[in-house]
Image (cartoon, rainbow, N blue to C red):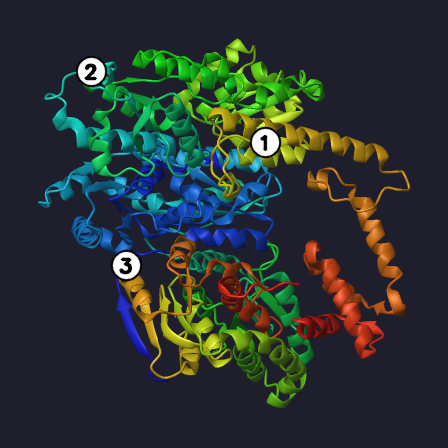
Amino acid sequence: MELTLWTYEGPPHVGAMRIASSMKDIHYVLHAPQGDTYADLLFTMIERRGKRPPVTYTTFQARDLGGDTAELVKKNIKEAVERFKPKTLLVGESCTAELIQDQPGALAKGMGFDMPIVNLELPAYSKKENWGASETFYQLTRTLLKEKVSSSDKINPLRWRELGRRPKVNILGPSLLGFRCRDDVIEIQRILSEQGIDTNVVAPLGASPDDIERLIDAEINICLYQEIAEASCEWLKRNFGMEYTNTIPIGIKNTIEFINEVHKKLDLPLTNKEELENKSKLPWYSKSVDSNYLTGKRVFIFGDGTHAIAAAKIAKEELGFEVVGLGTYSREMARQVRATAKDLNVEALITNNYLEVEDAMKKAAPELVLGTQMERHSAKRLGIPCSVISTPMHVQDVPARYSPQMGWEGANVIFDDWVHPLMMGLEEHLIDMFKHDFEFVDGHQSHLGHTATNTNDSLNSEKRKEKNSKEGIIWTESGRAELIKVPFFVRGKVKTNTEKYAILRGIPEISDETLYDAKAYFS
Amino acid sequence: MSKVKFNKETGPREVFCGLTSIVWLHRRMPDAFFLVVGSRTCAHLIQSAAGVMIFAEPRFGTAILEEKDLAGLADAHEELDRVVNDLIARRPEIKTLFLVGSCPSEVIKLDLATVAEKLNKRFLGQVRFVNYSGSGIETTFTQGEDGALKALIPLMESSNEEKLLLVGTLANNVEDRFKKIFRNLGISKIESFPPRQSTELPKIGKNTKVLLTQPYLSDTVRDLKHRGCEIISAPFPLGIEGSTKWFLAAAKAFKISELKVHEIISPLINRAKLALDSHKEILKGKRLFLLPESQLEISLARFLHNECEMDLIEVGTPYLNKDLMKEEINLLPDNTKIVEGQHVEKQLDRVRESNPDLVVCGMGLANPLEAEGISTKWSIEMVFSPIHGIDQAADLAGLFSKPLKRNQILTSKTLVTH
């Protein structure tokens, strides 16, 4: 039993939902009680999707447990298939259903449908979200392609020459609730296309089961996020001989390395090597004299494996920071994160406990934190600037603008996103330095919130203002008590409005009733 | 009883489970901690529903069951013991610890009552332990509060002192307003359940007159009755009409004249009506579809029809206690269609067919419906906002008028310039 106040990853069936919701023509019947439907809001509220996840929850209740929950599963599968007509059906269970062992996957397979059915067994008491997503994508790929295994020759990555066409690759791993996946795909496709390489299939994001079946039309696979796609890439390599890339194209050096790796695997000559250095503004911005102050900035990094490792490399080699802490919540990526940490002479922190991360952050005394939204909050409490580099997803991590992490534009985005909080840190310092100068305006709202502003000062000034209330209006005790209950961010407005109302009506003393009268008057 | 049409539906649902109510309960009682004994799903549910990252250490958490806990119940009990010890060592300020059952803990029949009993002996005088279930196989959303309150009743001492007991979580400022009004009516002893401190439980007995503030407390009401409390039958204090009848019912129980009530609340009513007008202008004649979630749906429908002149297409509710809702149902217009339970797909079919102007629904459904061109109001906001009482009637109406107003602004053909 593990005490958890907050968790970086959801349960494995949420990972399966990420795959199902990323794709087209798929439906997922999930044997689960009603409360598990909360997961829909991850997609509809956080990712702002205008579509419900393609998931039917069997919604079993306590009273069903004595009876036949298996019948309930079959009824839901039947209805879902009739209504949604999926080309492939995923069937699985959440934590509670796992305990009652109805084996919904086996039940579905016995119902005589002619569509492929993927039976998902995702152990909810030992595994987590990313593992569930990876396993689902792998089982789906395997189910849809296993019949082609024996009949297909191993894929020769050089065959595009004989076929007289441009080389084709698959981009595997991008999914909903993944960090900036939508934009990374566009960026990577653009880069590949410039190099004369076509994209065969992007999956799971936007793919249909038909697309999965034609994965083997490509020569190699781009493994864009190891957490999600490595298991599938490995299976495709073992069974079809498809090579896959290991380099994650985040940062300039890794993007160039990635392009090299793709060319090498396809035996495609790289003719524009010199050009590549100038594709992004990051190298020059980092070199320009005003970036001198970035040198040796202490940075603490925590996130999923893919983004944490990439961030460490960029921080050290491309921005000249000093990495003083590196960690991940992805246990599946622990080995790689440890290796990277060793190279940087720091000890890797592998944990799912955000309080441990906060402690490590405190001890490392960084000047910049690169982390998840949780580290952003921890850093805020410690008064340290932070930039978010990884899931778990927050509504802010789905920006309206084009904002990839990968490739040339990704490097531009990273430079801005990491350096601006530091500049704000500098600004903070200046504000602190000059705050006693008479030109300085009181009540400046710092981006660091309560840690950076002097609470006593602002309270005193509020009291001062209250005493000197205009037009000689007096706030009675009940009025003031009521005003204090108004949230601070609208308190000023409520106060002004109430006084305005009191003047208008010639009321000399403001009581709680006056406040409510004014509220009604102005609403 | 007015001629409403009752229907029942079963099938796949789209609602929260009872664990979600921890999100407001822990704020109400800052000296309590809610420990869910469940899975990673439970932990993820609460943090997703609450957006809890802003807390350094929230006053709720999950003891996540792992494979080894499932192997033997004896070990699971021991493990829970260990987790509780660690927690109390870390958070010595905790006065009451709620052990909250979940779907998996109920299915493996983890006996939280026995665990609580043992812990109570060990931590006597330091921390009190109570247990209830917020599991999704037994409870929906607000029913979690019902379970939590019911679990506290055995800890309440007996007293025959005459008092008014407000039952159900209210926003603190609303509660203060209500108490002031009741005091003005001449009721001197007014207490709340749940209290603001978990250790300050009200004493109850045959002279306790219970006035419900929330409609989802069936089990709590039953147990309060068993303790001799008198339950005041009234609609719920949502909107001017509901609140007025609620005050009147309380006054009657304390033998206070109607005249006195009107004398005190009519200034409130007048200004509330004034404030309500601008919202009514937007809501009037608009067609409303309420999907089931919080059990507040019937009261909301009554308010939005009777005071804001909206037309009711369908009123969903996850669970219907006809006895408790009698006064509310009586106020509904004839032929109102009430649907208890849910088949979310069939219900959404009806939403689309009926072409409503506004749908009240859960967060999972809101944006998909908006994308289809249907305006929505997500229901979870009703349990987080101060909406009770006469003074809040306009704010309550505002929750519904805002999406319509916004829709109007965004779809307006002419560009407004200032």
Q: Badge 1: few (under 14), some or many (20 or more) residues near its Cα, within 10 Å? A: many
Q: Badge 2: few (under 14), some or many (20 or more) residues near its Cα, within 10 Å? A: few
Left or right for A464, reference A196: right
Q: Position of residue A194 (x, y in %)?
A: 40, 24
Q: How far apart are marks 2 and 3 (CA)?
A: 52 Å
**Viewer-nearest of labels 2 and 1?**
2
Label 1 is placed on what type of residue? Ser
Left or right for B270, reference A175: right
**Viewer-nearest of labels 2 and 3?**
2
Q: Position of residue B332 (x, y in %)?
A: 41, 80
| Secondary structure found at label 1 | strand
Q: Which residue is drawn at 77% across and 73% down?
A: A501
Q: What residue is pinned by disc 3?
A: B345
Chain under numbered label 2: A
**Viewer-nearest of labels 3 and 1?**
1
Q: In which quarter of the image is residue A357?
A: top right
With respect to residue B375, does B115 lie above or below? above
Q: Position of residue A399 (x, y in %)?
A: 51, 41
Q: Badge 3: few (under 14), some or many (20 or more) residues near its Cα, within 10 Å? A: some
Q: What residue is pinned by disc 1?
A: A387
Q: What residue is pinned by disc 2?
A: A162
Q: Position of residue A467 (x, y in %)?
A: 88, 60
Q: Is residue A103 visible?
A: no
Left or right for A499, reference A86: right
Q: Quadrant of residue B57?
A: top right
| Secondary structure found at label 3 | helix
Chain under numbered label 3: B
In which quadrant of the rendered image does the C terminus of chain B lie? bottom right
Q: Which mark is residue B314?
A: none
Label 2 is placed on what type of residue? Glu
